[in-house]
Amino acid sequence: MTETIAFPQGPIGRVSGRGLVLRGDDIDTDRIIPARFLKCVSFEALGEQAFADDRKELAGAHPFDQEVHQGASVLVVNDNFGCGSSREHAPQALMRWGIRAVVGVSYAEIFHGNCLALGIPCATATADQIRALQDAVEADPAAEWTLDLQALTFSDGTTSQDIALAAGALDMLRTGQWDATGQLVARDAELTRTMQALPYLHGF
Amino acid sequence: MSSGTLYDKVWDLHRVADLPGGATQLFIGLHLIHEVTSPQAFAALDDKGLPVRCPERTVATVDHIVPTISQERPFADPLAEEMLSTLERNCARHGITLNGLGSGRQGIVHVIAPELGLTQPGMTVACGDSHTSTHGAFGAIAFGIGTSQVRDVLASQSLAMNKLKVRRIWVENHLTDGVFAKDLILHVIRTLGVKAGVGYAYEFAGPAIEVLSMEERMTLCNMAIEGGARCGYVNPDQITFDYLKGRAEAPSAEIWERAVAWWSSLASNADASFDDEVCFDAAAIAPTVTWGITPGQGIGVDERVPISEQLDPADRPIAEEAYRYMDLAPGQPIAGVPVDVCFIGSCTNGRLSDLQAAAAVARGRHVADGIKAFVVPGSEQVARAAIKEGLDQIFRDAGFEWREPGCSMCLAMNPDRLEGSQISASSSNRNFKGRQGSASGRTLLMSPAMVAAAAIAGRVSDVRQLS
């Protein structure tokens, strides 16, 4: 972590920054943040622990340890990224390391929702497009990439790919309503009506 | 689009509002919390100055970090102690019931909610734990959530959700002797893959499912998430109702008939339509063991570790990684692979019938030399029932350690863990790299009976061949 940038806030129209490639399908949340680091009552210290065991195994060769990638903010991954445990500690660790957007082939459902709740877009593209993007990002780690949530592109000015986001997630990010609490609390009258109609809340 | 399924019916009943952007606000009937994924949610609630909307619909326990040898307070690990005392403070402050250590009701969250009768058909159930899919065994729509969503449920008793598609997994015939629900779900995941369920709820149905006990159905639904499906469920039937009747938090006798009538009405209609349907033959499934680093890398105990060329090209890179990590050779028979540690327990297989199945194998036999084998009941209730039957003594006589309830080595957030590159036979749910507490530790997933057989033989063995 060479620099500290603000955590996501409000409407998110674009995310710009250097890219970082992490290859491999089915990268689970135990790998993103091993369970021993979940022994905490705050998320604050997690950034340093992202991919702790993978980094140790690769002894400095892991992308998160390479000097050239320090300060990168867009992670480019493959298929089924974030599978396994529901731990929000995983996207929290990535965010605190510096990641502000992820581009990949697909994501596990809970991980995707957890990222959305933090204002981190998880964009998708086909496996072929992702391979091309990963090659391009690796070829020039210093290049500045932009994930544009209006144009739905991921581009460094030379290479550009169309990307997609789940419709609901896209709308929530663009409008800044990705932090759902306010919306949910606001509809308390409707909530009460739903509860009144549920047999198991009233002795059937 | 699915229609007339239990999923559709329960979804519609719990729908509060349509949110801008297309998500649905969904009422949560039962919210379960534990010490690992809730502290930051309570802190966020405080930051926003919000109260807990329905404290009576949230139930807490402690499971992930508890030691299984001595549960005396304060815990030896100060971080574990801090997590539990934080949960205790949060529950006391907000009027939330905590089923704590020694309460007689403590245990793994996905074991205690069903056994207390808290989990019921037709509910929406959420918990900051991916194995919340377990509760789908009752015909509930149950799914894991992250900590921001735990905050949302605390604040509003609801969540912003997108509706899933429904895939029916139809299972013909019956499982054969020595083959369990664990083998069935490992077989399903091996066949469909670990990401096939993304975007789907899995409905498990068919003759093989109809005869499964509730505990077996829980094992099945528990691992739906390992196939990518955030929730899995079984339609409620007489087996469900018989299980629930008389449990502490189940409907009382006066309202029982009305409850059963309502629950029955929620089962998927005979003419329900599904987004997708797949069929399996239960009779063709063998005891199944994982050889790799994802729950989808499973094979029958009579099979060999697959050769890369036999696999779909997309699956080859992770197979290559698995050969290296597991130190297993392509083409090597899985039976006979020596193990170091044998673990029976977890939210997948830590219930009474799991311990009974393992004890039936252990009875009159002894754990092989040099093998560490231990049994961790899923809850205080399971422990009591097992002790009443003398299962603890059967295990001790056979050389197993008998422990106190908790998540234990399944995720190793407590003192139970693998060391170095030890290889374990485990009745848990994940064989990810590093999952069981050592960055190079290796896990072979299998049924509790197969774990017991591995402990006795000191190597992976076909439980059907033990007479």
Image: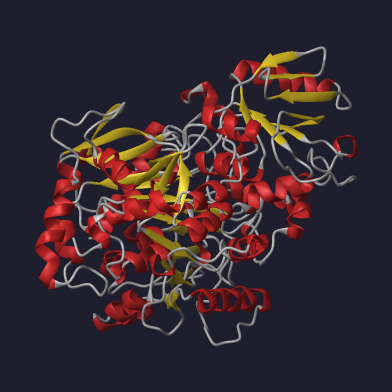
Q: How many marks?
A: 0
Whether residue B49 is visible, yes or no, is yes
User: Is B183 above or below relative to B168?
Assistant: below
Vertical comparison of A126 with B343: above or below: above
Residue, x 11% and y 71% (percent of image)? B254
Residue B70: x and y in percent read: 52, 84
Q: How is the image coloured?
A: secondary structure
- x and y, in percent, of residue A163 in the image: 63, 20
Q: Answer above or below: position of A132 versus B210.
A: above
Q: Position of residue B206 (x, y in %)?
A: 18, 39
Question: The N terminus of chain B is located in which quarter?
Answer: top left
x and y, in percent, of residue B414 in the image: 58, 70
Q: Is residue B316 left or right of residue A137?
A: left
Quadrant in the picture for the C terminus of chain B? bottom left
**Left or right of B258, for residue B415:** right
Residue B165: image quadrant is top left
- Residue B348 lies left or right of residue B424; in this view the side is left
Asked whether B310 or B223 is in front, the reply is: B223
In the displayed orientation, state which residue is furthest to the front: A189
Residue depicted at x 53% and y 27%: A167
Left or right of A56? Residue B176 is left
In the foreground, B119 or B222 = B119
Q: Can residue B429 be seen by looking at this rendering?
A: no
* Residue visible at 67% across and 62% down in the picture: B47
